[in-house]
Amino acid sequence: LANTFQGDGEPLIASLALSGVAFSATFAMIRWLGPTFIKSGLKGVDMSKHHKKELPECMGAICAIVYLLVVIVFIPFPFYKDIVAATSGGGNRDVVLQTEHVQQGRFLHRFPHSKLASYLSAIISLQSISLLGIGDDLFDIRWRHKFFIPAFASIPLLAIYFVDFGVTSIVIPIPLQPYLGELFNLGALYYVYMASVAIFSPNSINILAGINGIEVTQSIVIALLLVLNDCLYLLTPYPHPATDSHLFSLYFLLPFLGVSFALLWYNWYPARVFVGDTYCYFAGMVFVVVSILGHFSKTLVLLLIPQIFNFLYSIPQLAGIVPCPRHRLPRFNARTGLLEPSVTPWTAERQPKPPVAWALKLLDRLRLLRVTLDERGNFVETSNFTILNLWLVWRGPLREDRLAVELTAMQTVVGLFGLFVRHRLALLIFKE
Ligand code: UD1
Ligand code: MG
């Protein structure tokens, strides 16, 4: 496998091996530490089961910590040859000769400090987001307070981006080029855009949640599609200018897949543990890190289409136009054992204002919401604005694991289409 990739395959093999270690360590530690988490109060009730059992919450913290240790242990591997060459009086002669050759006669080997800086900034960002996630699981931070915190975690990334690449222009599609030129410089706005992706990705995964396994499966699908995207670049027969950034992306995604599959083992229906907000934030930030430092944040946006839809659809509740209960997860019908759309009740005192009422009825007509009116036309209840509830409006009641499978399949299909758009259709309107 490694040889089919251009250049040096050894760090990739080390990364694969360490990802295996990450899987095993996470697998064992979730089993061992579950009861400890319950004892210290990190627990939650599974609301969609007959027996309302308490399960350990915040298992994403174990994933994040194992992951961080693994990527830290991995640091020397991609730099091994550079370290040897930069420090060698003795050391590996071949490497010295090779680098001398590459440097065209210059004797001193330059250590790739900027590459190391990217790597370290990624680790700092991921550490910061893990702290936020653990804080949220411990103290249940208010939604409007925690929403912007990922922007702070992205500062190390943006600083490195500024110093190392600084590219803030976007390529204009061919039909628009006569008016706007080939490139359009967004300047500082490009940093605002990247910070917005950093805020959006973790939060959007956290609100597409509430049934067993869904947080982990959507993250695994996105990670696998990003890996596929990396391989499409790395397997081209010609050296591609983006080879390094896609290798970098693999080094961060493979261990993520390792810890995520271990977590899925316990979180899949019927769940034995919950992932907590830590996992959702952490997963979202892994995607931000690889896509910003790998210059493919627009590809990430294509892979987040279901999350973007869920977020846009949620806005009426997030913005308070429609009341937003603490939990919007689907409702468990104990008689049938199936999930149904959960609802927000409307009282005689609180009815939607006329334009809102009109919009809600229109959404109901379009089958984008379920509205229940009483005989006098007053609002009794409306289904909650999440993609999970909407799916149940469309498909009727489903068992929890069935709903998770269907949504994961939808995420996969939409994501593959996103990659297709990126790699095929984009060629029609952009010059490669
Ligand atoms: C987000 C959602 C909330 C949803 C919740 C479910 C928004 C604005 N917030 O809130 O609507 O109800 O996620 O995760 O959309 N749980 C289950 N089964 C599961 C997963 C979770 O019953 O498969 C319950 C458990 O009681 C668990 C709790 O949800 O303890 C975790 O909720 P938490 O992640 O703290 O909610 P938020 O992320 O704040
Ligand atoms: Mg959550």
Image: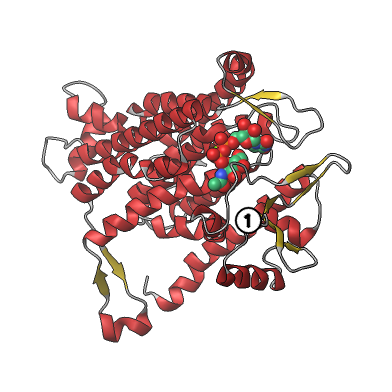
> Foreground residue, 394 or 227?
394
Vertical placement of residue 427 versus 153, above or below: below
Name the foreground residue: 336 vs 26: 336
Question: Which residue position holds label 1?
Answer: 349
Residue at (32% x, 70% y) in the render: 171
Look at 53% across and 24% down and name the residue there.
21
Crowd class of label 1 (few under 14; some 14 to 19; many from 20; radius 10 Å): few
Name the spot of residue 298 as percent of width and height, x first: 41, 60
Is there any visible trace of residue 216 in the rendered image?
A: no
Q: Residue at x 36, y 33 (%)?
A: 128
**Callout 1, which amino acid?**
Glu
Residue reaching furthest to the bottom: 178
Side (left or right) of 50 relative to 33: right
Question: Mark 1 falls on what kind of element?
Answer: loop
**Residue found at x 48% / y 56%:** 319
- Assign ligand 1 to one image quadrant: top right
Left or right of 320, for residue 149: left
Asked whether the viewer can see residue 430, the reply is yes
Percent coordinates x, y for residue 423 in the rendering: 48, 66
Q: Quadrant of residue 167?
A: bottom left
Q: Nearer the viewer, residue 304 or 10?
A: 304
Give the quarter of the image for residue 379.
Answer: bottom right
Q: Residue furthest front?
A: 349
- Tell me where residue 230 appears, x and y as whole percent: 46, 51
Q: Position of residue 216 (x, y in %)?
A: 60, 39
